[in-house]
Image (cartoon, grey):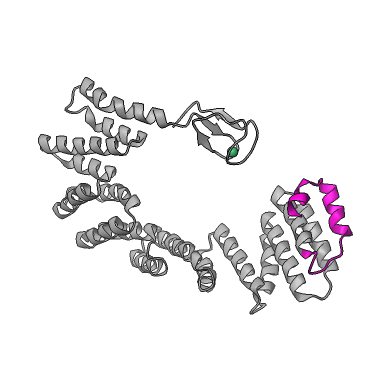
Amino acid sequence: MHNLLERHSDDALESLSQGLVVSPETLESHLHVGNLFRRRGDIEKAIHIHQDLLGRAGEDATLVSQVRLELARDFIAGGLLGSAEELLDELVHLQGEPISLEALDEQRLICEREKDWPRAIELAARLVPSRPELSAALANYYCELAQDKGRTGDRSAMQELLREACRVDRHCVRAMLMRLDCELWRHDHPAAIATMGELARDAKAFVGEIVPLLRRYDALGVPVVSEFLRGLAESEEVPPVILAVLAETEDDEVARQWRDSLLQRVEQHPSWQGIGEYLDVAGRDDKKLTVIEKIAPIIIGLYRTMPRYRCGKCGFAGRELHWQCPSCHAWNALRPVISPL
Ligand SMILES: [Zn+2]
């Protein structure tokens, strides 16, 4: 039914909606027509359809609430936040109705848009028990607020908020990195090392993000910190950490070993990023020809696996030319890739 609706012209859709009786059975189709206009950006028409629907919905309270929620969504999409808030406020007070949670969530999204973090926190905290996946957003609201406090120089309020962020989302990488920022700022190196260890354990992909922070607070030369980093570079082989350790190394032989470990890494996991990282430091002791000999097989290997065609509609990429995209089924959407990077 919905796919059929998508194919109708706008006028046909509108008259279809007006000709159809409003009942719990047909409500979904009615709402769908309005939402279709909203998705297309024709907010005025969406509002018109939903308001018309409201006039015809009769006494059924659930029906009326559902239409009002969609109307509020139209207002939000049209930037009429005041009118949306008014509608949502009423819906939120329908205790015990599933619709009140949806209204609460729309209010949360408005707060996000308006960067009203204290209220966003309050709303998200009410939603988390029934929607645990929102705890990641909640933690980010605490981080946003912490960042605001940091800007005004209130570091203790900042740290308190970051603790809250980690409490609601134990894996909040952003909160961990911001906590590291605070610890480095107050030269608490043991605490910083503990936080970096936690990051290496829980958020390995982001370990490289500690390097700019260590630079900002001149912590790379601090003996306990550089010792920890060397250990991290050896065990986790994170290129940004290896590069940071390499930059601090004065012993030529040790530096060569670190360069070799970068090369080994890119041989095992070929990537343009890795090649760039290696080439950036390789020229210091090796002759150019040796560097090319080492790197050429990796580049050729990458070239042979590079996608040759990409879909302009959905981004699907592959090495064979399809006239119909295997992913989004659009015709003539695949084009030869000119710039692979
Ligand atoms: Zn496609």
Quadrant hosting residue 165: bottom left
Q: Magenta includes 112?
A: no
User: For the point 34% across and 50% down, which residue is it?
Assistant: 205
- Which of 318/126 is in front? 318
Residue 145 drawn at (x, y percent): 44, 63
Residue 69 drawn at (x, y percent): 70, 66
Quadrant hosting residue 55: bottom right
- Which of 124/335 is in front? 335
Q: Which quarter holds ligand 1?
A: top right
Q: Quadrant of the N terminus?
A: bottom right
Seen as rendered, the residue at the extreme right is 19
- Which of 163/137 is in front? 137
Instruction: State the predominant SS element of the stretch in magenta.
Output: helix
User: For the point 30% across and 25% down, which residue is it?
Assistant: 296
Q: Is residue 287 visible?
A: yes
Q: Quadrant of the C terminus?
A: top left
User: For the point 19% across and 28% down, which residue is it?
Assistant: 284
- Which of 265/327 is in front? 327
User: For the point 89% across and 58% down, which residue is it?
Assistant: 19
Residue 184 drawn at (x, y percent): 26, 57
As drawn, is 317 to the left or to the right of 329? left
Q: Is residue 219 visible?
A: no
Q: Magenta includes 6?
A: yes
